[in-house]
Image (spheres, rainbow, N blue to C red):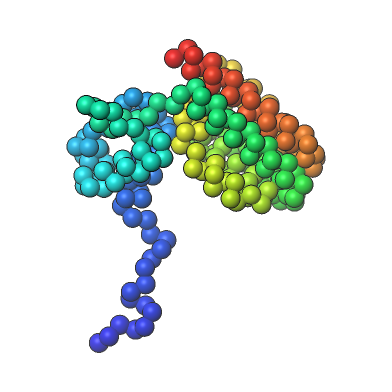
């Protein structure tokens, strides 16, 4: 009996492939520091750790290399790429421009419900900070900025930020662990949320840009120390 038209052959586009799942896992492992800059990525070991085939591992490593997260070293093979001070500075410059404008637009466009959602997301981030759960801090910070860009109507700009997210989180892992950063970050983010609540677009932009400049300064200092 022939299958009914348009049913059995449809592709489930919501389902992620093994390659996509493996890619996400590797991005996460690099972003949270499981694999550190300069670490060798040995195919056989990765196959065992991820429980996937060598062909999947090779595809994922090629993709990560295209994203700038992995580099191939002669006589050594693939390693986790080291983020240079210049690359970090460029990332923070991009963040300041995009996040500042997103805050500006959000202050002008967002309604009370959207602002309440952003405030709650920031509260969740700060709660994770107080508990010392830095992995949750990074995940919740990403959720805050995704909501900020969404409410600003800047979905394309968010895609640009997402393409840098693993590198942003590598830097974020460095800055949020610095001494005294919890209280400082809470004050910076509260300033942004308050400006959004007041509908003060110029102050929202300034607060967002000042926040990025501060973390850029901390990252530069930490990279010199390392």
Which residue: 26% across, 47% down?
A: 56
Occupied quadrant, residue 202:
top right
Between residues 114 and 120, which one lies in front from this camera angle?
Answer: 114
Which residue: 54% across, 15% down?
A: 221
Which residue: 64% across, 25% down?
A: 213
Q: Note whether 98 is above or below 222 in the view shown.
A: below
The reply to whether residue 135 is visible in this rendering is: no
**Left or right: where 214 falls relative to 61:** right
Which residue extends farthest front?
Answer: 74
State the image coordinates of residue 155 (x, y, percent, origin top left).
60, 51
Report the quarter where the C terminus lies: top left
State the image coordinates of residue 219 (x, y, percent, origin top left).
53, 21
Report the quarter where the N terminus lies: bottom left
Which residue extends farthest left?
Answer: 44
The reply to whether residue 22 is visible in this rendering is: yes
Which residue extends farthest bottom?
Answer: 1
Which residue: 73% across, 31% down?
A: 206
Occupied quadrant, residue 217:
top right
**Left or right: where 144 falls relative to 57:** right
**Left or right: where 126 falls relative to 32:** right
Occupied quadrant, residue 62:
top left
Q: Note whether 120 is above or below 88 in the view shown.
A: below
Q: Note whether 157 is above or below 216 in the view shown.
A: below
State the image coordinates of residue 117 (x, y, percent, origin top left).
66, 46
Which residue extends farthest top?
Answer: 225
| Numbered label tally | 0
State the image coordinates of residue 59 (x, y, percent, origin top left).
29, 46
């Amino acid at each position: 009996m022939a299958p009914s038209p348009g049913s059995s052959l449809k592709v489930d586009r919501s389902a992620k492939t093994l390659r996509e799942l493996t890619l996400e896992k590797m991005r996460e492992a690099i972003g949270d520091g499981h694999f550190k800059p300069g670490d060798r990525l040995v195919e056989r070991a990765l196959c065992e750790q991820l429980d996937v085939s060598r062909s999947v591992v090779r595809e994922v490593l090629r993709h990560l290399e295209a994203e700038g997260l992995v580099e191939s070293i002669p006589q050594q093979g693939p390693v986790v790429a080291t983020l240079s001070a210049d690359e970090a500075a460029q990332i923070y410059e991009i963040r300041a421009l995009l996040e500042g404008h997103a805050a500006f637009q959000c202050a002008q466009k967002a309604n009370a419900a959207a602002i309440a959602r952003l405030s709650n997301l920031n509260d969740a981030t700060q709660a994770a900070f107080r508990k010392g759960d830095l992995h949750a801090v990074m995940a919740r910070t990403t959720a805050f900025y995704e909501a900020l860009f969404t409410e600003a109507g800047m979905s394309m700009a968010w895609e640009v930020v997402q393409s840098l997210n693993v590198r942003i989180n590598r830097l974020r892992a460095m800055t949020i662990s610095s001494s005294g950063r919890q209280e400082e970050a809470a004050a910076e983010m509260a300033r942004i949320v308050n400006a959004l609540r007041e509908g003060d677009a110029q102050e929202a932009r300034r607060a967002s840009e000042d926040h990025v400049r501060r973390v850029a300064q901390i990252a530069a200092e930490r990279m010199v120390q390392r």
